[in-house]
């Protein structure tokens, strides 16, 4: 469906839909148009710059830009696919009906089978750059698109969108996309779409925390990624339709106190399994000297989380006693207990790496870091 903030106007026989990308970001706009299987041309302008995306029945078939550096010849030159001499000579031969790509093939500057990947790369880069635009006006003209002279493209728009959003560095854009850090995030259950997406481990980790009861802020608290990165991933998943913003009913139907405790115990167990593997590795290297090392780690973390770790001992097995920690913070509300315990365990993870590097050197620290990286991935799927 077309976003409701668009102004629709008749432009001759074609329907033109106009608006500003400050209110509808380009990824959201493009996803909305393609999800509706529309056909037409989306043009976005920012000052003198303009890019157009051609869409046929919901599929992106081409893209153009008035930026000289985004033309096919410049793209090939930038990627070192052709030489400067080829570019100069081919440019002189361009005429109506004579395209640069065809001329370059005739000159044997590139092979004919290299032309399609080159055009795909050019189109991808035009659209990916467009995703970074945060200001400008757009116009979507619903009309037929003549695809006969366009090179058929084979890339997935969904994966192109998520690739583009991975490049976003605008907190304003991300916050506008997620709406509110107190908003509940709900999975849509669109498994068919999930099969199409090429998600990274980090994106899978964030998605694993979307239960339908947790807010954006709560997901940030349990994710090992920086808050900006977590929010950016949630926005990308929302744009693609994997998750959605929930309402008051979703928040009120949250898990019970018992369910929260069981969930927290499962997360702590994942941390403990990771700490146990680190302990076993170090014991194999330094024997009983591992226990004083674990004491140093706990002492360092206890400077900030002493009340939580009272009566907790990481010696002998490297595991933190969940029941003891829970008893230490029993007077806190469930959400505060959860946030405090996860924050403390993340700090313990950092302390393990720091102390091992200081006491045992870079080689053993690298092994421990590998164990921890895999362990944090498991925590993310808890």
Image (cartoon, rainbow, N blue to C red):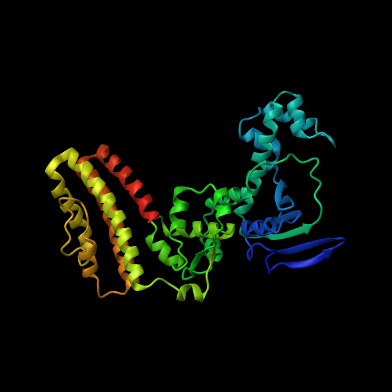
Left or right of 364 on screen, residue 216: right
Give me the residue at 70% from left, 42% from top: 68
Q: Is residue 92 above or below residue 328?
A: above
Q: Is residue 163 visible?
A: no
Q: Quadrant of residue 133?
A: bottom right
- Residue 25 visible? The answer is yes
Along the line of sight, which residue is nearer the eye, 316 or 229? 316
Which residue is at the front of the view, 317 or 21?
317
- Residue 348 at x, y = what percent? 26, 55
Identity of the residue furthest to the right in this view:
12
Q: Is residue 202 left or right of residue 155?
A: left
Q: Position of residue 204 (x, y in %)?
A: 46, 52
Q: Quadrant of the N terminus?
A: bottom right
Image check: 308 left or right of 10?
Answer: left
Q: Is residue 147 above or below residue 339?
A: above
The one of 23 and 2 positioned closer to us in this rendering: 2
Q: Position of residue 129 (x, y in %)?
A: 62, 49
Which residue sits at x=58%, y=53%?
192
Report the residue at 21% width, 69% height from top. 327
- Tell me how many marks there are: 0
In the image, 5: left or right of 298? right
In this picture, is 316 found above or below 234?
above
Q: Position of residue 10 (x, y in %)?
A: 83, 65
- View extreme (top): residue: 108
Query: Quarter of the image containing the C terminus?
Result: bottom left
């Amino acid at each position: 469906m077309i976003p409701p903030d668009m102004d629709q106007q008749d432009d001759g026989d074609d329907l033109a839909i106009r608006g500003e990308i400050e209110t509808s970001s380009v990824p959201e706009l493009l996803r909305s148009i393609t999800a509706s299987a529309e056909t037409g041309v989306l043009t976005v302008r920012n000052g003198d710059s303009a890019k157009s995306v051609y869409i046929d029945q919901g599929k992106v078939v081409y893209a153009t830009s008035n930026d000289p550096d985004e033309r096919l010849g410049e793209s090939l030159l930038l990627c070192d696919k052709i030489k400067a001499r080829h570019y100069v000579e081919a440019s002189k031969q361009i005429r109506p009906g004579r395209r640069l790509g065809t001329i370059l093939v005739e000159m044997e500057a590139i092979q004919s089978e290299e032309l399609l990947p080159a055009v795909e790369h050019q189109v991808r880069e035009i659209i990916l750059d467009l995703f970074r635009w945060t200001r400008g006006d757009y116009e979507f003209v619903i009309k037929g698109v003549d695809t006969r002279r366009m090179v058929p493209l084979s890339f997935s728009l969904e994966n192109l969108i998520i690739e583009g959003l991975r490049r976003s560095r605008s907190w304003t854009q991300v916050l506008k996309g997620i709406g509110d850090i107190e908003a509940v995030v709900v999975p849509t259950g669109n498994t068919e779409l999930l099969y199409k997406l090429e998600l990274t481990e980090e994106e899978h980790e964030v998605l694993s925390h979307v239960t339908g009861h947790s807010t954006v802020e709560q997901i940030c608290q349990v994710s090992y990624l920086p808050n900006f990165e977590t929010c950016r991933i949630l926005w990308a998943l929302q744009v693609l339709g994997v998750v959605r913003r929930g309402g008051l009913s979703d928040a009120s139907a949250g898990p019970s106190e018992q369910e929260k405790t069981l969930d927290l115990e499962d997360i702590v167990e994942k941390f403990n399994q990771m700490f146990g593997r680190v302990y076993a590795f170090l014991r194999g290297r330094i024997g009983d000297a591992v226990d004083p090392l674990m004491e140093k780690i706990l002492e360092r973390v206890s400077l900030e989380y002493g009340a939580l770790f009272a009566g907790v001992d990481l010696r002998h097995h490297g595991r933190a006693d969940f029941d003891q920690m829970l008893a230490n913070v029993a007077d806190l509300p469930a959400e505060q207990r959860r946030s405090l315990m996860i924050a403390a365990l993340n700090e313990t993870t950092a302390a393990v790496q720091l102390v091992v590097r200081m006491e045992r050197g870079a080689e053993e620290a690298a092994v421990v870091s590998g164990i921890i990286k895999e362990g944090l991935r498991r925590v993310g799927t808890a």
